[in-house]
Image: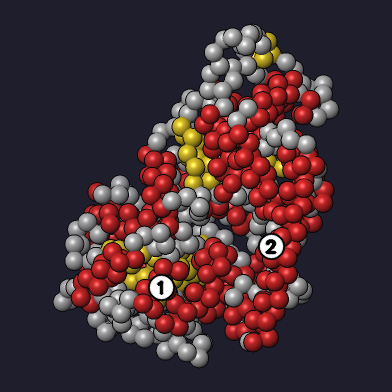
Amino acid sequence: MKEESQIFASCSFSSLGLHSTLCDQLRERMNFEAPTSVQAQAIPVILSGRHVLVNAATGTGKTVTYLAPIIHHLQSCSPRIERSHGTFALVLVPTRELCMQVYEILEKLLHRFHWIVPGYVMGGENRSKEKARLRKGISILIATPGRLLDHLKNTSSFLHTNLRWIVFDEADRILELGFGKEIEEILDLLGSRQNGASGKQNADSSITGMPRQNLLLSATLNDKVNQLAKISLENPVMIGLNDNKMLLNATIEQSERLLSGIDDEVEHPNKSLGSSVEEYKLPVQLVQRYVKVPCSTRLAVLLSTLKDRFDREASQKIVVFFSTCDAVDFHHSLLSEFKWSPCLQTEAETKQMFLSCKILRLHGNMKQEDRRATFQTFKTEKSAILLSTDIAARGLDFPKVKCIIQYDSPGEATEYVHRVGRTARLGERGDSLLFLQPIEMDYLQDLEKHGVSLSEYPLFKVLDSFQLYGQKHRGGRFVSAEWHPWLLALQKELESFIFAQTKMKALAKNAFCSWIRAYTAHRGELKRIFMVKKLHLGHVAKSFALKDTPSFVGKSFQSQTKKRKMDQKHKGMSKKRKIIRK
Ligand SMILES: Nc1ncnc2c1ncn2[C@@H]1O[C@H](COP(=O)(O)OP(=O)(O)OP(=O)(O)O)[C@@H](O)[C@H]1O
């Protein structure tokens, strides 16, 4: 367990210079007795008005780090700020869920400052209602980039002439999601671009009389954060960084290329990757493990692992990460419906749910109201499994998550860090499990380069502990997990279950195809580890409990791959055209 003293500072919020009412609010409404170390370090610097880049481990309280100083300054404006003054602070976040989460925290912090109005705009919400709220005035606005840009261009009543703060929460993720161009446009429209020809630098807010202040926060750094820092921060203070981690000497041209997403290895063969070998800060109390699983038994091992955890502790919260929306949908239906009682002797006896806990799903193709419902439910549930794409990897603060399972590889090491960061928050215990196929084991070395080391999960011990038809079966003498009697029996049941239902079969096939597509999409160094050529399609099909002959599935995959290649060719051409235009 992490020492409390390492997480919390030995000072008070008021000693950092925050207003007493805000300190009361932090204590009484949020139950925050003392600042965390990052809050103690960063809040005084942010209060001073300097541009700041904060790098601190996941779950260390970065949200309050930037919200508290903004509220402190706004509440002290005399005369009081009003709605008609428009927006003073803008917080940009990569996902809708993070937008809602930051808004909820902000609402709590503003409880005693009713004249400071919080608000949010994000994709999936009703534009006209947002326009009406913007017209009335929102003092601190949380936004996802696409929707914000939409309002900046099309909502004439959106007043931002008094803007003083721009915060990028999870900055690199915003860029990874392809919002680079939007960010450039936003900075230009708000006149907050550093060194850019179009931006008027450091415009003052006429109400607060203070110059612009931009803040960037992330638990991991990479080239994208560096480049965004380069164009948005002026002479920033770095908190939680070693000097050698930043590449702020990159050229503006390089920054623009990175922001445009034109940063693949073909165009930058000798690109300096100073930040890509950065040692990531992970919560020290996090227990990180990997499990080496042959592809054909992945599904059965996943179910066994989950069952084992719930057999040991009936009430707990687990997040399982998948690479695609289709995979989330398939596994959600499967886990919610699959029945098997491994100890039953005859077919006639009633089968029971294999996992009896609540199963939730979250991904970007879901309807907004369903996303919202999942987000709120998983927050309040005491016991549940959340199946998600990387949409839940960044910033989300679900209380009491015990374990993170990365069933599909996260790709970049940064994503590994953010995914596991959903557990072991603020000194709590937590563990994580990364699934790797034997052909993917080099990924561990990739993580090792970033100071992330994992120990092996005792798979055989777990498998041996299950009772099958009234007795335990030991698998230790078997060469590979795929021959373990428990897994063989479970795989057979899973295949029969999928085979019997048209709906499940369709979900499995969709999931199979998108899984392969996602697998082929690994970039750079990772392409050498996750090689689609090395996959046995029949074994991949088994990991979706498909009985279909591989050739059938293979054909549909081949046609999809062909289509993808054609698409890529077209995209590549338009990318090249873009570069030529520049
Ligand atoms: N001073 C504090 N005392 C107690 N709890 C705190 C304090 N500051 C923040 N927290 C709590 O710590 C948790 C993590 O905070 P937060 O989500 O801001 O972390 P983060 O550093 O932004 O994480 P991530 O990198 O994953 O986005 C939240 O539940 C928050 O309420």
Residue 150: image tag: 1
3D distance between C-alphas at marks 2 and 1: 37 Å
Q: Nearer the viewer, residue 234 or 127?
A: 127
Q: Is residue 259 left or right of residue 93?
A: right
Q: Amino acid at mark 1?
A: Asp
Q: How many neighbours does mark 2 have within 10 angstroms: few (below 14), some (14-19), or many (20 or more)?
A: some
Residue 277: image tag: 2
* Between discs 2 and 1, the one toward the N terminus: 1
Q: Amino acid at mark 2?
A: Val
Q: Nearer the viewer, residue 18 or 371?
A: 371
User: Which quarter of the figure has residue 459?
Assistant: top right
User: Which quarter of the figure has residue 539?
Assistant: top right
Q: Residue at x 47, y 54 (%)?
A: 395
In percent of width and height, residue 317 lies at: 48, 36
Q: Residue at x 49, y 25 (%)?
A: 356
Residue 472: image tag: none
Q: Residue at x 25, y 73 (%)?
A: 135
